[in-house]
Amino acid sequence: MKPGRSNGQPGRAADAFERRASRAEALAPASESGAAPLAFAAGLYRAQGALAGAIEAVPLVGALETDLARFAGGLAGVLRYAADNGPPGLAAEARARGDDGARLIEWWRGDRSGRGDYLARALLRPYAEVLAAAGIRPEPVAQDESGCPFCTAPAWIGWRRTEPGESGAQRFLGCGLCGGQWQFNRIRCAACGEEDPHKQAVFQSEKHPTVRLEACETCHQYVKSIDLTLNARAIAEVDDLSSLSMDLWAGEQGYTRLEPSIAGI
């Protein structure tokens, strides 16, 4: 696996959130999934970007137990946005939750999955991206061969892209926590590591020619993948939200997404 930064784009972490927000707004009017998921994503990205900007202004060591006190006051903006604009379940949870530092630290020390705690991932993503941009290794570092090489969180999106000197498109996975990317074996399950090609299934839809679901018949999990060779302007984690119907279909077939998208699906 070869780690890297989010879609190879340089710049401050706060700027990366603004790029995502702008892409979400551009896609919203024509989205088959409707404008609502992309509009929510745009606002969440901007709330996270504001938090990232505040975090970039303070010294960090990579240990959340130490760093959290230095930016905890900024978490309220992300929580407030989720409470005011999120779908009913998420909004209720955000209103009831508050910025519980002990809960965030417990999540950070675990598998760092948004499936177990969507809000924790949303709240701590700016922190993780600032650490990655600064090259500060997050602590503790769990051992997860399939997870993000930088922060160990699960992959939440994939894409195919042609690299210089390569004859075909390469497979990349993207992290929903630190924004990192890494190259991954094209015939391997990102969830359980299964490498038998006969147990790897790919599902596509004529409505979404740049999208495919890469599923595993061993663990019944999948990763959604966006073909950037067909649309170089796409930002995989954002363009993902235009094809939520494919995730709903996969759930009906008994597959579970390895890590939920920003829409929580």
Image (tube, rainbow, N blue to C red):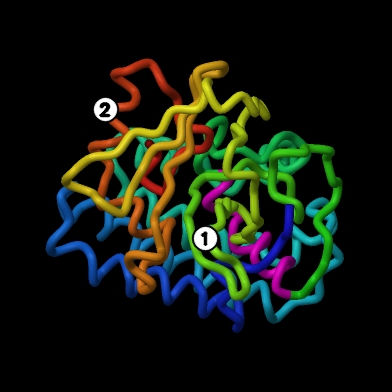
Image height of 249 relative to 244, above or below: above
Res 254 quadrant in image: top left
Q: Disc 2 or 1, which lies upstream in sequence? A: 1
Q: Which amino acid type is shown beneath numbered disc 1?
A: Gly
Mark 2 element type = helix
The residue range painted magenta reads: 120-133
Residue at 34% over, 23% down = 251
115 over 124 or under it: above or below: above
Residue 155 included in the magenta stretch of the image:
no
Mark 2 crowdedness (10 Å alpha carbons): few <14, some 14-19, many ≥20 = few
- Whether residues under marks 2 and 1 lie with C-beta atoms below 8 angstroms apart, the answer is no
Q: Distance between the residues labelled 2 and 1?
A: 29 Å
Write the residue at 52% across / 37% down. Answer: 259
The structure residue drawn at horizontal position 64% and vertical position 60%, both measured from the top left corner, is 180
* Residue where numbered disc 1 is placed: 168
Q: What residue type is labelled 2?
A: Trp
* Residue 163, above or below 210: below
Asked if residue 250 is positioned above or below residue 10 in the image, the reply reads above
